[in-house]
Each structure stands twice: as structure tokens, then as C-alpha cells.
Amino acid sequence: MDIPRIFNITESAHRIHNPFTPEKFATLGEALRLEPETRVLDLGSGSGEMLCTWARDYGISGTGIDMSQLFSEQAKLRAEQLGVADRVEFIHGDAAGYVADEKVGVAACVGATWIGGGVAGTIELLAKSLRTGGIILIGEPYWLRLPPSEEVAKGCGAGSISDFLMLPDLIASFGDLDYDVVEMVLANQDGWDRYEAAKWLTMRRWLEENPHDDFAKEVRAKLTSEPKRYAAHTREYLGWGVFAVMGR
Ligand code: SAH
């Protein structure tokens, strides 16, 4: 079981697989006023940076589930590196339908809401693991500016304009689900650059090391087109943030 190989190639050097920076995760952890020993569940935990740094900085304990074998292994290594391997656990697997045995104080899905079939379904899934009074975290894109055409939306990696909302509408959508938005930390263009531009050097190095790989043609085409696509589309039109919500 694994995610499509292209992500394991382009994001192999990433610690954070979304437009957040280490500073943004620290800001989010502080904003949530995490108490030591809080249990955190993270569906689509990637290389584990959020759980590992929060375990180090705020004394939380956590479980992450991720479908990428590579990212899950990197998460375990990161936990050892930061000296928190006794507090965080990483499971390689499909997080769809995953419910924690023991209820958690924070249940998160940061940039992988397809796991629950969208924002509403993911909130419903996370709620099953949440203790009363707990906080749900959703990391999700939104439109900074509405794309003028479906073509531009596709250039941003969206299936269509309707895949994402403008920020006020995304915030209102949590209310429609009977949740209060109690905090939010938003990414910015520097964070987007770290996420997207870091893939380019990774692709270039990978191509140099794997010129005869079956994937070399695809990676070459991506490296050629990605910088311009990103600058013209994602960087201009797409926002991203983590929203902390609590049931009313
Ligand atoms: N939350 C992480 C990773 C976000 S990227 C971070 O902030 O860095 C999305 C992640 O979802 C990837 O790590 C990918 O491997 C994982 N993923 C995709 N489909 C999944 C599924 N069905 N179950 C678990 N993880 C999944």
C-alpha cells in the first residue's frame, strides 16, 4: 500500500508536505494552548513534523497514520532524532475510517481531507476519536482570488473552481456544520515557495541519480513545467490554512 510514486519522489526531501513552515506549526501549537500529555491524532501525518515538534515543544503525545511508506519511515526517524520516539507513534496505513482506541484532545487532518471524502466527512471522522471539548484541526486550501476560468483552477492543481471556497466562505462552512472556528493559522507565499520550490531541486537531483528510471520522463516534464505553472497559478490564486474548530 502506498501513495502514487510521483509524490514519494518530488517530496522525498520535505519535512512538511504543505505550505506551512516550522514557524507556522510552532505558532499553531502555541495558539492551541496545548497542555502537556494532550493526545493528538493526525490523519495523513506525512513525515511527522507536526507531531514530533509538538511532542518536543509542548509535551503532547500522538499517533500519526500515513499511507506513504517513505514518509512514515521518515516520521519515525524524525521522532528518534528529536528524542520523542516514546511519545509519538507512526502507523503506515490508510487513514480512511481510522478511529482512535483512546479519545484524543486534538484530532487533525492537515492537508489530506480527501481521507474523509472532503472537509465535512473528515470532520465527522475525526469527531469519532475526539473527547468532549476537544479540538479538530483541518488544513485546507482556499481561493485567495477566484480563478477567472476553470483552466486557471486546473493550473492550480484543483479539479475545478468548485473544489475550493474563498476564505470567508470556508470559515462559514464550518459554522454550517455546527462547529465554531476557534483559531486559525494561515500560510503565506513564502511557505508556498518552501513547499513547491523545494520539489524542483529534489526532482533535479533525482533525475541526475536515476536517468534510466521508468519515471524519468515524467519527472523531467514536471521539472520543466512546474516553476512557471506554480508562479502563474498556485502562488497567485491559492491560499492555505489550518482551522481549529470545536463542535457547538
Ligand atoms: N499532514 C502532513 C502531510 C500532508 S500531505 C504535513 O503537514 O506535512 C498529505 C499526506 O496524506 C501525505 O503524506 C500522503 O502520504 C497522505 N495520504 C494520502 N492519502 C492517504 C490515506 N488514504 N491515508 C493516510 N494518509 C494518506
Image (tube, helix red, strand yellow):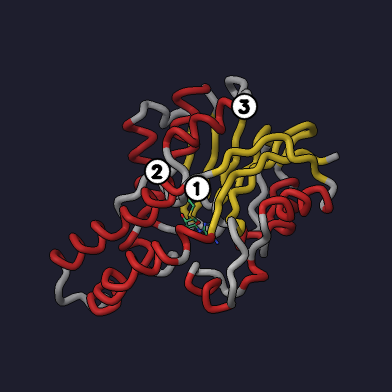
Q: CA distance from mark 2 to mark 3?
A: 19 Å
Amino acid type shown at disc 3? Thr
* Disc 1 to disc 2, C-alpha distance: 8 Å
Quadrant in which the N terminus is drawn: bottom left
> Is residue 164 depicted above or below 64 in this figure?
below
Q: Quadrant of residue 30?
A: top right
Local SS, label 3: loop
| Rendering coords of residue 83 (x, y %) | 37, 26
User: Distance between the Cα atoms at labels 3 and 1?
Assistant: 17 Å
Q: Is residue 18 positioned above or below 87 on the image?
A: below
Residue occupying the point 38% across, 51% down = 193
Please state the horizontal and vertical placement of residue 181, each as a whole percent of the image. Answer: 74, 40
Tell me if residue 215 comes above or below residue 189 in the rendering.
below
Q: Is residue 243 above or below residue 170?
A: above
The residue wearing badge 1 is 45
Q: In screen coordinates, is 102 left or right of 218?
A: right
| Element type where label 1 sits in the image | loop
Q: Tell me the residue that label 3 is attached to.
A: 38
Residue 96 image position (x, y, % from top left): 62, 59
Residue 104 appears left or right of 59 = right
**Some atom of ligand 1 lies within 8 Å of the CB belonging to the residue at label 1:** yes
Task: Give the residue displayed 69% in from the left and 57% down from the top.
Answer: 119
Q: Earlier in the sequence, mark 2 or mark 3?
A: 3
- The answer to which of marks 3 and 1 sits earlier in the sequence is 3
